[in-house]
Image (spheres, rainbow, N blue to C red):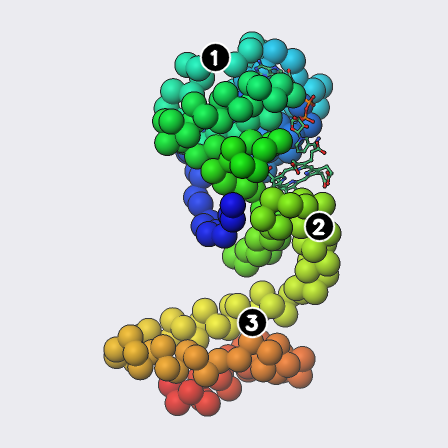
Amino acid sequence: MSFNYVIHCDLAGANCLIVGGGKVALRKVQTLLETGAQVTVVAPDFLPDLAGIEHERLHCLRQPFTIEDLANRDLVFVATNDRALNEEIAAACRDRHIPVNVADSRSESTFIVPALLQKEDLLISIATNGKNPGYSRALKAYLNDQIDDRFLEALDIWCAVRDRVKEKVQGQTEREKILRRLSLLDLIKAMETAPKEDVYRKVIECLLL
Ligand SMILES: C[C@@]1(CC(=O)O)c2cc3[nH]c(cc4nc(cc5[nH]c(cc(n2)[C@H]1CCC(=O)O)[C@@](C)(CC(=O)O)[C@@H]5CCC(=O)O)C(CC(=O)O)=C4CCC(=O)O)c(CCC(=O)O)c3CC(=O)O
Ligand SMILES: NC(=O)C1=CN([C@@H]2O[C@H](COP(=O)(O)OP(=O)(O)OC[C@H]3O[C@@H](n4cnc5c(N)ncnc54)[C@H](O)[C@@H]3O)[C@@H](O)[C@H]2O)C=CC1
């Protein structure tokens, strides 16, 4: 089993279900609410920290899971402390072609959640194929220190250059050839001695745009 195809989804308005109201559910609720998804949690008992969240897109059902809870869901997260129940819900989701994440079983999941390092539009997702989330978290903390503001400024310059190339150069192959000449490390080095605007102008000059 290999979770080796990564996509970055826009979950705004998506209908997500979390089964279970414990520590894992709390973690998933926090990250899902940030995406703009509608989040329903179903469980007989909720952690106080979870029960205490008031949010217009969060809907808590204090009752045991029933199969009707799967109706119209776009994504399901299974996180009860009942192994047999988790397995049963996962199978029901797969039957209905609903993507499902199972907190205590990689093999029953159709997707896993990576650690996400997000800085503005720069998104770096880290996973260990489900083997060690603590390692993913540690690598995220390490990269968080390495990826400083220069990388975001380099992204700004690269986007501005790309817009300019799209405007000035005809033909996809020609545009690609020019953009391939950009070097991330050179941009970052150039920004050590010159302001962003100057670096942009220099790049445009070098690329004869
Ligand atoms: C397979 C996967 C399925 C999934 O949930 O998608 C999974 C499964 C399991 N997690 C376990 C434990 C913990 N998970 C965390 C935290 C995170 N777990 C996340 C993802 C994933 N967890 C997927 C794999 C990702 C990958 O490929 O690396 C993160 C990245 C994303 C997120 O959940 O949002 C998020 C960190 C986010 C961040 O900080 O940015 C902590 C808390 C901590 O570390 O602080 C602990 C307790 C400490 C520990 O055990 O390490 C256990 C053992 C349970 C047991 O012992 O019984 C299992 C089950 C098993 O391993 O079988
Ligand atoms: N603690 C952690 O960080 C991680 C734990 N796990 C595993 O994931 C599972 C959940 O972990 P926690 O959130 O820590 O457990 P927890 O014990 O904090 O919460 C379990 C939740 O499941 C709910 N539940 C029980 N029966 C239910 C039913 N019939 N319908 C709906 N909800 C029901 C309970 O009310 C409770 O809210 C466990 O199997 C655990 O081994 C997996 C990854 C990480």
Is label 3 or label 1 in front? 1
Question: Which residue position is annotated with label 1?
Answer: 66
Q: Residue at x 61, y 22 (%)?
A: 83
Front residue of 176/157: it is 176
CB atoms of marks 2 and 1 within 8 Å? no
Q: Does 194 sit above or below residue 144?
A: below
Question: Ligand 1 within 8 A of label 2's CB?
Answer: yes
Residue 100 pos. (x, y %): 48, 32
Q: Residue at x 50, y 21 (%)?
A: 88
Residue at disc 1, secondary structure: loop
Asked whether the viewer can see residue 56, the reply is: no
Relative placement, left or right, of 95 versus 154 is: left
Q: Earlier in the sequence, mark 3 or mark 1?
A: 1
**Most foreground residue, 152 or 66:** 66
Q: Earlier in the sequence, mark 2 or mark 1?
A: 1
Q: Amino acid at mark 2?
A: Tyr
Q: Earlier in the sequence, mark 3 or mark 2?
A: 2
- Is 177 or 13 nearer to us in this picture? 177
Give the side of residue 16 with respect to residue 147, left or right: left
User: What amino acid is labelled 3 in the image?
Assistant: Ala
Q: Label 2, on which residue?
A: 135
Q: How far across and how far down the image is residue 194, in percent?
A: 63, 82
